[in-house]
Amino acid sequence: MTALAEMPAVLTIEEAATVLRIGRGAAYEAARSGELPSVRIGRTLRVPRHALETMLGIEPGDVGPSTSEATGADSDGFAKSAGGAAGNALSG
């Protein structure tokens, strides 16, 4: 998926839905209810990228957390463990 910072300044509802990982219909409903910031231009709805970044708590232009930070995985892609018996059993 393209990083939000690399997307156009104004996104379509479909593009915003992809970023939010929701369906197209849910995105249109969120825009209608005001939950998703949008601008009507003629008969089309557009979502300003900066408004979407603000809504998500991302600094404008920031690429956000790395995949491992977002998923809690280590550099190998495995979930980080808190240790304990399971962690110790695997280590030796």
Image (cartoon, grey):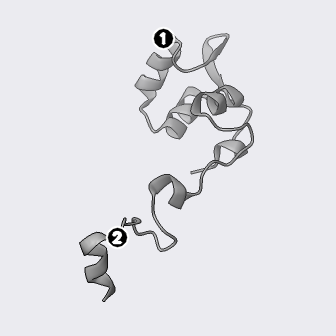
Question: In the rendered view, does 23 fall on the left or right side of 85?
Answer: right
Q: From the viewer's perspective, is residue 18 above or below residue 81?
A: above
Q: Residue at x 59, y 27 (%)?
A: 55
Looking at the picture, which amino acid does disc 1 mark? Ser
Vertical placement of residue 87 versus 2, above or below: below
Q: Earlier in the sequence, mark 2 or mark 1?
A: 1
What residue appears at the point 54 percent right and 21 percent down from the top-left corner? 36
Q: Bin the neighbour count of mark 2 within 10 Å (Cα to Cα): few under 14, some 14-19, many 20 and up.
A: few
Which disc number belongs to residue 33? 1
Residue 23 location, x and y as percent? 41, 32
Most foreground residue, 83 or 20: 83
Q: Position of residue 67 (x, y in %)?
A: 54, 58
**Please, what secondary structure does the residue beneath circle 1 have?**
helix
Classify mark 2: helix, strand or loop: loop
44 vs 79, left or right, is right
| Res. 76 mark | none
How much space separates mark 2 and mark 1, taking CA atoms? 45 Å
- The tag on residue 83 is 2
Q: Position of residue 24 (x, y in %)?
A: 45, 29
* Quadrant of the image occupied by residue 58: top right
Residue 39 shown left or right of residue 90 in the figure: right
- Give the answer, above or below, for where 61 lies relative to 69: above
Front residue of 84/40: it is: 84
